[in-house]
């Protein structure tokens, strides 16, 4: 069943009559974003025959499909997510794959290791599905590549003018100062960040920070392996649960997923100061609501100015907005004469809670 935004196609004045009758290259269907011409889905939320995957976060890479196409850079983390039985084909950046006559290629999205935008070309039409993306520098993944297209399908996780990110170096300065103050006070620093992506970005930023020792939650440590195997340099870490009872954690840095906050696991660390690295920390109330001592504004998504700049730079004449604060972006684009529409998806962007799962199993703390 195809619904959603097929009606949008063909309104562009620059298009030939032939394009007026064609259906949308990508449509919102029951199981996800569907390409009828190539008979495949992008990040389907239900099992399908052919899935093209933007990245390994749980809301984009789900179990049960017969085959998966992903970037070579992202193969390790996707394998960890999906388990050994999944059929995964990995391709190089920009490599063209013919799927039933549709040209498909993957281009860096700069979100987490291996994250890709999916470029789909058929009958002279180019569509790009962004998945999640950011344009800020990040040592743990290939930088975002701008891909020109007719239709851009974008996220809008932080699509409100209040969301503007500070420089990454500024955030790491704050994290180091926080750790020093905690060490001097005889406390451990408990830093929460999503187990896949954010935790490794934190550990990469702390690689030369002269802090430590650095301990990790099991979910973070498991994914660290994939990042190191991909050649990403992270701070030296130890799996916290390997340490004997009664270990003194004062002066250490512990990196854990936000789901560990308030858990029994936390108790062993004694006197801790808690911090959370997330785009949501831009809003003071978001930190207070979670009873955190500190919030660090570090996101793996574009902020509002970068979102607008990127969408414009794609040259797209039609923009579909799939998740996050969709309406402000739709209004902004419409005001500028760009055809824009919010469409439904089951993608979530940067979530408050991050299920700590790998290949369908709960990971021990
Ligand atoms: Zn994501």
Image (cartoon, rainbow, N blue to C red):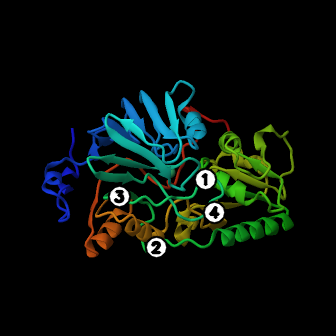
Which-is-in-front pick, marks 1 and 4? 1
The disc, 3 or 2, on the residue closer to the chain's N-terminal end is 3
Q: CA distance from mark 3 to mark 2?
A: 20 Å
Q: What residue is pinned by disc 1?
A: 141
The disc, 1 or 4, on the residue closer to the chain's N-terminal end is 1
Mark sitting on residue 305: 2
The image shows residue 74 at horizontal and vertical percentages of 56, 42
Who's the residue at 67% across and 43% down the image? 230
Q: Is residue 4 left or right of residue 72?
A: left
Mark sitting on residue 77: none
Q: Are marks 1 and 4 in contact (CB under 8 Å)?
A: no
Helix, strand or loop under label 1: loop
Using the image as rendered, state which of residue 259 and residue 311 is in the foreground.
Answer: 311
Mark sitting on residue 292: 4
Q: CA distance from mark 1 to mark 4?
A: 28 Å
Helix, strand or loop under label 3: loop
Who's the residue at 75% across and 68% down the image? 178
The disc, 4 or 2, on the residue closer to the chain's N-terminal end is 4
Who's the residue at 22% across and 52% down the image? 5
Q: Is residue 282 left or right of residue 235?
A: left
């Amino acid at each position: 069943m195809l619904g959603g935004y097929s009606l949008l196609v063909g309104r562009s004045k620059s298009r030939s009559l032939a394009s007026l009758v064609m259906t949308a290259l990508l449509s919102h269907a029951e199981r996800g974003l569907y390409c009828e011409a190539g008979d495949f889905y992008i990040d389907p939320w239900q099992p399908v025959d052919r899935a093209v995957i933007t990245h390994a976060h749980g809301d984009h890479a789900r179990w049960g499909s017969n085959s998966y196409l992903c970037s070579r850079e992202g193969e390790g983390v996707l394998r960890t997510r999906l388990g050994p039985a999944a059929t995964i084909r990995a391709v190089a950046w920009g490599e063209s794959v013919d799927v039933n006559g549709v040209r498909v290629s993957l281009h860096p999205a700069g979100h987490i290791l291996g994250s890709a935008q999916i470029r789909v070309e058929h009958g002279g039409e180019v569509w790009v599905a962004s998945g999640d993306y950011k344009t800020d520098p990040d040592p743990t993944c290939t930088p975002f590549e701008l891909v020109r297209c007719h239709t851009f399908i974008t996220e809008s996780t932080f699509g409100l003018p209040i969301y503007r990110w500070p420089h990454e170096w500024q955030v790491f300065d704050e994290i180091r100062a926080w750790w020093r103050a905690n060490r001097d006070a005889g406390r451990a620093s408990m830093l929460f960040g999503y187990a896949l992506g954010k935790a490794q970005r934190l550990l990469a930023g702390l690689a030369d920070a002269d802090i430590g020792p650095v301990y990790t939650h099991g979910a973070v440590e498991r994914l660290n392996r994939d990042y190191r195997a991909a050649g990403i340099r992270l701070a030296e870490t130890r799996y916290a649960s390997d340490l004997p009872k009664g270990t003194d954690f004062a002066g250490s840095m512990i990196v854990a997923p936000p789901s560990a906050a308030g858990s029994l696991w936390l108790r062993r660390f004694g006197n801790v100061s808690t911090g959370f690295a997330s785009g949501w920390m831009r809003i003071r109330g978001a930190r207070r609501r979670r009873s955190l001592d500190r919030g660090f504004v570090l996101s793996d998504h574009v902020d509002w100015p970068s979102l607008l700049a990127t969408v414009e730079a794609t040259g797209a004449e039609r923009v579909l907005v799939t998740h996050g604060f969709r309406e402000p972006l739709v209004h902004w684009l419409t005001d500028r004469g760009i055809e824009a529409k919010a469409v439904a998806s089951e993608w979530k962007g940067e979530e408050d809670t991050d299920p700590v799962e790998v290949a369908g199993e709960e990971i021990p703390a």
